Image: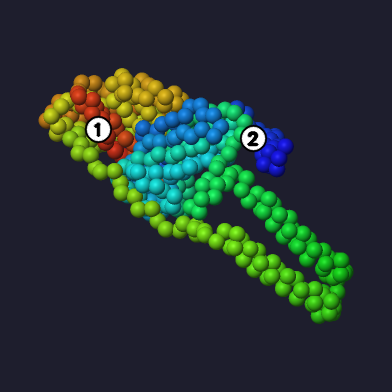
């Protein structure tokens, strides 16, 4: 067994021990999520409206590469309480580093540093992932906003098969060297940790025994600190100062000589153009919205005008990664989308007929499902700012999808009005 395998077994063992140690503390009964539902609903509904999320590799072998991709719209109804997305980053929410992120691209631009994004616009992301730790993992796209924190998107399960011991991540540098980033520099890292720990122990130990703390404290209180330091202490202190400075300088010069060509950590800003605004002939406005608490339903009245040349059918309302569809929307649903996030017959309307070109209608639309409770979105009713936002998806007769961001204040009701 070589050093690399030894290191890998150490990591496996360490993760195992850590899991065992944490299990009784947190009682991790079969986890179906990892806390995303506890994120405030105004954050999940009114910041990032995720859509077309795809967990490409439902099952990936160790070392194989897969993708997490999709699109999102930054809601016009962005809460006042959340910092505007002036510095953002696309990341992946996962239980530890089960995948290695090889790249993230937003609208085709590599996003290895953070950058601003525009409210009201759409973005398409592709995160390339390399399978690292075997298991059944819940994976979320995540949108990090500086000073607001990470905002988790919908979670889907991705499996990784194989053995961690087989994982490698060979990297070819610009100077033509190849190394495995999983093990590169491990010995150096461990050496420095041990070295500085030994120096620290020596430093503390020296003063600890000359004399011991309690004696020292009493002398300090009675006579001050001057008599506590004898000339040897001062020499030892000066020697340590010189020693530490020499070690740091020599260490730096040695590393610099060994790797003369290096690129500093990137501290710039990714400039990402939003997706072009697609002309949308379907104009929708929410004129009234209420949440029926016992009925677990968000009801809204839409004032909709079809300015296009084809009939338009409403098929889906999506918010916080949860999708409410009627039969028209269900037919367009990606079968791989996590079933626990879909209310397949959750969307009903009082006018099911397609909205004809030139027609203006007021449609009463209801998205009803226990998911409002299960996903804890109903908590908006406890917010001082009771509002929702999401995306309304409609389809023209020829199959083109039209997306309308919608948002409105929500009135809580406890019985069906007018019933
Ligand atoms: Cu999760």
Tag 2: Cα neighbours inside 10 Å, few (<14), some, or many (≥20)? some
Asked whether 193 or 142 is in front, the reply is: 193
Front residue (pair 265, 157): 265
Residue 188's place in the image compared with 12, above or below, is: below
Q: Quadrant of residue 362?
A: top left
The image shows residue 192 at horizontal and vertical percentages of: 69, 57
Judging from the image, what secondary structure is the residue with disc 1 in? strand
Is the residue 207 above or below the residue 100 in the image?
below
Judged from the image, the secondary structure of the residue bearing numbered disc 2 is helix
User: Toward the viewer: 360 or 328?
Assistant: 328
Which residue position holds label 2?
Answer: 165
Judge whether residue 411 can be spotted in this image: no
Left or right placement of residue 268 versus residue 235 in this view: left
Does the beta carbon at disc 1 come under 8 Å from ligand 1?
no
Q: Quadrant of residue 369?
A: top left
Q: Residues within 10 Å of mark 1 (few under 14, many from 20)?
A: many
Q: Earlier in the sequence, mark 2 or mark 1?
A: 2
Q: Is residue 78 left or right of residue 100?
A: left
Residue at 40% over, 33% down: 53
- In the picture, residue 74 is in which quadrant? top left
| Residue designated by label 1 | 402
Q: Position of residue 45 (x, y in %)?
A: 39, 39
Q: Quadrant of the N terminus?
A: top right
For discs 2 and 1, the disc positioned in front in the rendered view = 2
Q: Residue at x 64, y 68 (%)?
A: 249
Q: Is residue 337 visible?
A: yes
How far across and how far down the image is residue 189, in percent? 66, 53
Specify whether 191 is left or right of 170: right
Measured as percent of width and height from the top left, residue 33 is found at 53, 32
User: Going 31% across and 49% down the picture, which residue do you hit?
Assistant: 273
């Amino acid at each position: 067994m070589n050093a690399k395998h030894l290191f890998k077994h150490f990591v496996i063992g360490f993760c195992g021990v850590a899991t065992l140690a944490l299990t009784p503390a947190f009682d991790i009964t079969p986890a179906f999520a990892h806390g995303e539902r506890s994120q405030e609903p105004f954050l999940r509904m009114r910041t990032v409206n995720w859509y077309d999320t795809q967990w490409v590799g439902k099952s990936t072998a160790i070392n194989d590469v897969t993708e997490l991709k999709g699109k999102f719209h930054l809601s016009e109804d962005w809460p006042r309480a959340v910092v505007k997305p002036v510095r953002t980053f696309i990341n992946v929410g996962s239980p530890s580093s089960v995948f290695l992120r090889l790249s993230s691209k937003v609208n085709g631009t590599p996003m290895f540093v953070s950058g601003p994004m525009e409210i009201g616009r759409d973005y398409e992301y592709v995160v390339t992932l390399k399978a690292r730790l075997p298991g059944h993992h819940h994976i979320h796209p995540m949108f990090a906003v500086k000073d607001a924190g990470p905002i988790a998107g919908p979670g889907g399960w991705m499996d990784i098969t194989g053995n961690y011991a087989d994982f490698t991540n060979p990297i070819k540098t610009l100077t033509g060297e190849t190394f495995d980033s999983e093990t590169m520099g491990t010995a150096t890292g461990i050496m420095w940790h041990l070295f500085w720990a030994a120096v620290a122990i020596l430093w503390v130990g020296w003063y600890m025994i000359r004399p011991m703390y309690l004696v020292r404290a009493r002398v300090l209180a009675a006579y001050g600190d001057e008599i506590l330091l004898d000339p040897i202490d001062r020499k030892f202190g000066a020697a340590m100062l010189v020693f530490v400075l020499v070690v740091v300088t020599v260490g730096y010069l040695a590393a610099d000589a060994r790797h003369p060509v290096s690129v500093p950590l990137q501290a710039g800003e990714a400039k990402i153009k939003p997706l072009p605004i697609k002309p949308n002939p379907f104009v929708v406005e929410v004129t009234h919205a209420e949440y029926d608490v016992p009925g677990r339903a968000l009801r809204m009245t839409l004032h909709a005008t079809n300015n296009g040349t084809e009939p338009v059918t409403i098929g889906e309302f999506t918010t916080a990664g949860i999708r409410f569809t009627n039969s028209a929307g269900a037919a367009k649903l990606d079968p791989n989308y996590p079933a626990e996030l879909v209310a397949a017959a959750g969307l009903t309307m009082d006018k099911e007929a397609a909205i004809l070109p030139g027609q203006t209608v007021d449609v009463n639309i209801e998205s009803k499902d226990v998911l409002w409770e299960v996903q804890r979105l109903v908590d908006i009713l406890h917010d001082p700012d009771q509002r929702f936002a999401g995306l309304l998806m409609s389809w023209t007769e020829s199959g083109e999808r039209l997306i309308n961001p919608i948002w409105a204040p929500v009135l809580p009701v406890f019985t069906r009005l007018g019933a």
